[in-house]
Amino acid sequence: MSRGSRGAIRLCLVALFFVAAPAAHAVTFANTAPITINDAAPAAPYPSSINVSGVTGTPSIVELTLHGFSHSCPTDVDMLLVGPHGQSSMLMSDTGDCSSNARPPIELSFEDGLGKVPCIPLGSLETLQGGAYAPTNRAPTDSDACSSINPGNAADVFAAPAPPGPWQANLAPLAAADPNGAWQLYVMDQYTPDSGSIAGGWSLFIGITPPQLMSAPTIGAVPEVGKRITAHTGSILNQGQPAWQWSRCRATTCTPIPGATSASYKPAKPDRGMALEVSERAVNSGGTTAAQTSARSKPVGPPRLSSSSKASQRILKQKGVIVTALSDLGGTLRATGTISVPKTARVVRLAPVKRSLKPKQRATVKLGLTGAGRKAIAQALANGAKLKAKIRLVVTDAGGGKSTSRRTIKLKR
């Protein structure tokens, strides 16, 4: 399509421009591949894409910058930004200048709340200057319309796969949604002649509201060696993710525990007798809060392993000794036992038992007599000896947690 005459006098806005700094707590993504603005056709590539990933937090502002924009008639150029969820904003349409004068490449930024891209009269030696502008989509009905730019008041057209209009000149809908995904920049040259390029590609600045940690974490259980405990997070705003650090405390001093940086922690032997505390920070792409720290726990104790049995057992009749174990700690239960025979140097060892044990699971085991041991015990009991079995129960888990219980059981025939 031909632009036709551009000789009419136009009412123009003249403004001072500046390059806006990225918003505080911004994350930046860029596509540095050049974009060729073909005459009266879609640019190449069409669209140009930036994939945003790994951003956490609530977006507050979006700014787009063109690096090395050069075109002898910027009023020919229409630019549409489409966000990862289909939101779109017309960045620039039917505005700027068309002097066809030589000019250096410029940086153009677009951000809501700034002045519009100006109209520059035909015949002026002035050209569009680099700077930061609000998205600008001028139409013939606008009070500040640039005249003789849009021949026949032709509608803006973006070739597929750009989404159909109408398009708003507003970045707020793009800033209000999850920024992760593919952002697409569609560039069209509507009229002939003239062409140009964006030599350095383009970049996105996405401002992220920093998180807020509204309350301190808490520790949800009495700590014991080998028994995992979990911290409960404080209230976090703005999609912050918790970051943790556990410490062991003695008197007024707390020392961070190396590697203890998850929401849960399994106390180990060095923690025994000391209190624990956990510090929490909230983190998103906009920053990290100051830490808030839980109240101290009670001192770390050994894990509880209780055992029960009949105080006196008929070892010969039941062919061994029977014991029941109940442990806070899940893992491997090992039961061993010995019987000392009076007036001899002999110690009879009961057959050991090994089995898996879940936390809070009650397990009954029998430590049996061997053939030789049965004979020695039977003879000692027949001679009136008072025998006792000393039983030791140990539960260990894969993380090094360990609990122990001992029982003494009187024996009879």
Image (tube, rainbow, N blue to C red):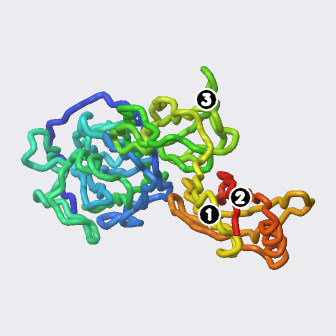
Residue extending farthest to the bottom is: 371
Type of amino acid at the residue the image marks with label 1: Val
Q: Mark 1: few, some, or many residues within 10 Å (few <14, many ≥20)?
A: some
Mark 2 vs mark 3, CA separation in Å: 35 Å
User: Where does residue 228 sit, x and y in percent of width and height?
Assistant: 55, 50
Q: Is residue 233 left or right of residue 123?
A: right
Verify CB contact (< 8 Å) between mark 2 and mark 1. Answer: yes
Q: Is residue 289 above or below residue 410?
A: above
Residue 391's tag is 2
Q: Which residue is mark 1?
A: 323
Q: Which residue is mark 3?
A: 249
Mark 2 vs mark 1, CA separation in Å: 8 Å
Q: Is residue 13 above or below residue 135?
A: above
Q: Does residue 1 appear anywhere in the picture? A: no
Type of amino acid at the residue the image marks with label 2: Ile
Quarter of the picture containing the C terminus is bottom right
